[in-house]
Amino acid sequence: MRYTDYGELARFSWVSTMCQIFLICLLSVAGCQAPQVVSEKGFTSLFDGQSLKGWTLLNPKGSGYSVTNLVENTSTNAVIYCAKGGGGNLMSEKQYDDFILRFDFKLTQGANNGLAIRAPMQAGSLAFDGIELQILDNSGANARYKKKLRPEQFHGAVYDVIAPERLNAQKPVGQWNTQEVTAIGRKLTVKVNGKIIINADLNSVKDPATLLKHPGILRSSGHIGFLGHNDEVYFRNIRIKELSRVELDNKTPAGFRALFNGHSLAGWRGVLAAPNNNPIRRAKLKGDLLVVAQAKADETMLAHWRVVGGELVFDGKGKSLSTGRHDYGNYELLIDW
């Protein structure tokens, strides 16, 4: 108990105080658990809710992909679905470089599908010629395939290349999941229901055998696609936000000297035609013979090499080119290609 400033006894209720403390704690916890608002500014829908407009289906299997209105809990949702026994590569007609892709997906028991990103428009396996992120019912598929799945084959994996960091982000079969894929340059992040399952640098893939098997991992742009494998899967709320690609400033690092000025072919020359493309044979050419041969080589170079937007571009139909200076010995060379 305590006394007031006027000397009167103040009655202190421990029950009331504890109730107040409990209420404050409860409000604090509720505030921490409040759903985080995710901005949708700048996103464009890839599904009009009525048709597959904007998409192309390649190598269809069974009924392929269709659009339907799915009735669930007294509400109706327009969805794209791959029926059991159906599939093929459902590809966006537009290509994308850097982006944030968001969509909802619902799986059936053991269902298997795939998400292609930066992929070519083709009917073949985009797990190799493009980049495929696995879409899979982890628990059901593990039983379906008798626990023979490799880490790089579970949901969210860069198929056969990079394994997901966690396998417990999915909701039970039959419930909708939300996925977000962010591709910025060589950085790739995948979230499922707000949990990060992939946070990778594609440049970390350095094994020669893997890169030879998966050349698509090097692609910087391409189509979005859903890759059906005969299992029933549903998609909705598909939208994308294109991101401006950060261009390299092309500044020469300290201690280096630029070989390409970004504006012209100054400092470069064509490689002499055979047999004088051999450095030893070329060194033997003197006087007018060298001048004539070099002029012809430079003419060929200018017909097939050009500068476009600060980049050195070759049409693939001519000969090689070389720096004007030939006497480089020990050196370190930096180049973006």
Image (cartoon, helix red, strand yellow):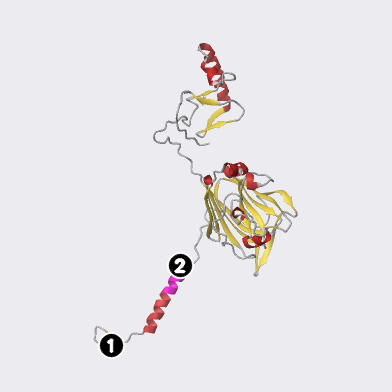
Write down the quadrant of residue 292 in the picture. Answer: top right
Give the residues in magenta. Answer: 25-29
Q: From the viewer's side, name the closer residue of 43 and 99.
A: 99
Categorize mark 1 by other alpha carbons within 10 Å: few (<14), some (14-19), many (20+): few
Q: Residue furthest top?
A: 288
- Any mark on residue 32, and which? 2
Is 305 drawn above or below residue 164 in the view shown?
Answer: above
Residue 294 visible (yes or no) = no
**Residue 139 point in image, percent of width and height:** 63, 62
In the image, residue 250 lies at what x, y percent?
46, 36
Q: Is residue 124 above or below residue 309?
A: below
- Image x and y of residue 67, in percent: 69, 57
Magenta: main secondary structure: helix
Three-letter amino acid code of the residue under disc 2:
Cys
Question: Alpha-carbon distance for marks 1 and 2?
Answer: 40 Å
Residue displayed at 57% across by 58% down: 179
**Residue shown at 55%/32% (left/top)?**
313
What residue would you read off at disc 1? Answer: 9
- Check disc 1 and report its element: helix, strand or loop: strand
Question: Is residue 26 found inside the magenta-colored segment of the image?
Answer: yes
- Is residue 328 depicted above or below 65 in this figure? above
Q: Amino acid at mark 1?
A: Leu
- Residue 319 shows in the view: yes
102 is within the stretch colored magenta = no
Mark 1 vs mark 2: which is more N-terminal?
1
Q: Name the one closer to the observer, 243 or 197.
A: 197
Label 2 sits on a secondary structure element that is: helix
